[in-house]
Amino acid sequence: MLWKRHIPILIVAVIGSLTLFGWFIDEPNIKAFVDDDATQWFDILASFAIFLGGFNLLKMQMQKVLRKK
């Protein structure tokens, strides 16, 4: 249970906090992470989430259509 729920939440919280506070900290390494790496990862994750959301929406609608037949 710990590996499935708590560890991913901890990773997301740490990276999210680092990214959020990176805008207010003048450390060059953190600035480079926020400006380059984090932005690319957020774009990848957002596109994956949009794909999964669209696929799930299509799946649910197909189930409703097939159930009515």
Image: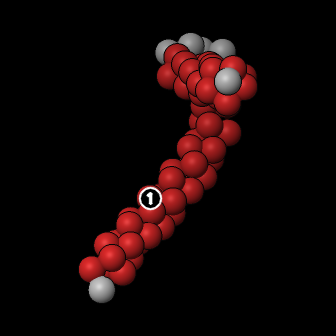
In this view, the residue in front, 46 or 64, is 64
Q: Image height check: is 27 above or below 59?
A: above
Is residue 69 visible to us here? yes
Q: Residue 23 appears at what percent x and percent y?
A: 51, 22
- Which element type, helix, strand or loop, lies under badge 1? helix
Q: Quadrant of the C terminus?
A: bottom left
Whether residue 15 is situated above or below residue 43 in the rendered picture? above
Residue 64 falls in which quadrant of the image? bottom left
Tell me if residue 13 comes above or below residue 34 in the rendering. Answer: above
Mark 1: few, some, or many residues within 10 Å (few <14, many ≥20)?
Answer: few
Residue at the farthest left position: 68
Counting from the top left corner in percent of width and height, residue 14 is at 62, 19
Q: Residue at x 48, y 67 (%)?
A: 55
Residue 7 in the image, given as x and y percentages of width and height = 68, 23
Q: Which quarter of the picture shows residue 35?
A: top right
Give the residue at x 51% y 59%: 52
User: Quarter of the image holding residue 22?
Assistant: top right
Q: Residue drawn at (72%, 25%), measured in percent from left and top?
A: 3
Furthest residue toward bottom: 69
Would you name the residue on which mark 1 appears? 53
Nearest to the observer: residue 8 or residue 17: 8
Relative image position of residue 53 (x, y in whole percent): 44, 59
From the viewer's perspective, tell me whether residue 24 is left or right of residue 35.
Answer: left
Quadrant, the N terminus: top right
